[in-house]
Amino acid sequence: MTIQIHLDGNPAHEPGTEVRGRATWQSLNRQSKSVLISLLWHTEGKGTEDVAIIEQIKVEGPSAAGSREFAFVLPNFPWSFSGTLLSLVWAIEASLEPAGEVARVDIVSAPGTEEVQL
């Protein structure tokens, strides 16, 4: 089984703009009930990791090989940032349900399309 994410254009965006792309999959088995495509952010670094799923697209009963276009509008906050102890990373993720392979592409959502450095 393979699952991939392809972005249209640059992975860095201004808040409030649209992220577009396509999730593709191949060789799914019969146990794969759905493909979830998600816009999310997560923290990395010291302490407990936080995750927030902002929006999801669910593809029910996917064929063994297929694809789905997606378009998500990034919210105005929080911005992507990187600090000494903690970073906030935006991502587009595609996953097979029940628990299976996951593909993730990190993106930037910040003014000037530059991750804020703390």
Image (cartoon, grey):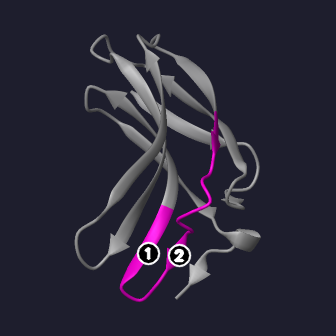
**Where is residue 74 drawn, in percent x and y?**
62, 51
Rendered view: 43 above or below 4: below
Residue at 36%, 70% (x, y): give it.
Answer: 44
Q: How crowded is mark 2: few (under 14 residues within 10 Å), some or many (20 or more)?
A: some
- The image shows residue 50 at horizontal and vertical percentages of 31, 62
Quick one: quadrant of the N terminus? top left
Residue depicted at x 27% and y 15%: 31
Q: Is residue 92 above or below residue 44?
A: above
Instruction: Look at label 2 and name its amino acid.
Output: Phe
Residue 87 got which mark? 1
Disc 1 crowd rating (10 Å Cα; few below 14, some 14-19, many 20+) is some
Which residue is painted at 58% across and 22% down in the image? Answer: 67
Magenta-span inclusion, residue 83? yes
Q: What element carries label 1?
A: strand
- Helix, strand or loop for disc 2: strand
**x then y, percent, for residue 45:** 33, 76
Whether residue 81 is in magenta: the answer is: yes
**Circles 2 and 1 in contact, beta carbons < 8 Å:** yes
Type of the residue with mark 1 = Ser
Spatial separation of the CA atoms under disc 2 and disc 1: 5 Å
Q: Is residue 104 left or right of residue 112?
A: left
Q: What stretch is highlighted in magenta?
A: 71-89
Q: In this view, does 99 lie above or below 82?
A: above
Q: Please tell me which residue is depicted at 48% across the width and 22% down the height of the picture.
A: 26
The front one of 16 and 91 is 16
Q: Earlier in the sequence, mark 2 or mark 1?
A: 2
Near-viewer residue (69 or 32): 69
Q: Name the residue under label 2.
A: 81
**Where residue 100 sits: x, y (%)?**
29, 32
Which residue ends up furthest to the front in the rendered image?
Answer: 76
